[in-house]
Amino acid sequence: MPITEHGAKVAGSVVEGLKSQPLALGLIVLNITFILFTTWLAYTINQRTESQYRVKDEQTAMLLAKLDQIADVRAQVQAISERITGNTALVKGIAESVERLSKVEEDHERRLRDLERQKP
């Protein structure tokens, strides 16, 4: 017996069995419908999840870029702060030098006045 005849016999017996038990046919249709619905639902949820991950990945990349910018700004601020500290030390040294010069000038003026008083 060829394979096609066996396939035809099996198909015929399945159809006869489903005719005699319509509840089984209903359950098969219901199961197939449930499987198709579940597959569609899983596909939809997967698409939504992938979309959410894409958005989160973009946000993470943006935040990391901003963190790099913040680190650069922090380094610049630190460099400026070090320069300000150095400039403060220079200004302090200049202020001390000016103060010493003013004391020396005052001392010289006092000596000149003393010398002028001592002249006959």
Image (tube, rainbow, N blue to C red):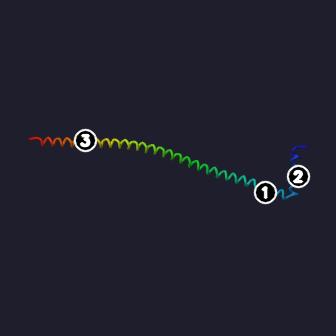
Would you say 88 lies left or right of 58 here? left
Residue located at (26% from left, 41% from top): 100
Indicate which disc, 3 or 1, sits on the residue closer to the N terminus: 1
Instruction: State the separation of the CA atoms marked 3 and 2.
Output: 121 Å
Kind of residue indicated by mark 2: Ser
Residue located at (48% from left, 46% from top): 70
Instruction: State the separation of the CA atoms marked 3 and 1.
Output: 104 Å
Foreground residue, 20 or 9? 20
Residue at which label 1 appears? 30
Residue located at (88% from left, 46% from top): 6
Of all residues shown, which one is farthest toward the right?
Answer: 1
Residue at which label 2 appears? 13
Residue 13, percent across and down? 88, 52
Residue 37, percent across and down? 73, 55
* 117 shown above or below 29: above
Residue at which label 3 appears? 101
Residue 14, percent across and down? 86, 52
Q: Could you tell me which secondary element the residue under label 3 belongs to?
A: helix
Please name which of the two marks, 2 or 1, marks the residue nearer to the observer. 1
Quadrant position of residue 120: top left
Of all residues shown, which one is farthest toward the left?
Answer: 120
Residue located at (87% from left, 45% from top): 4
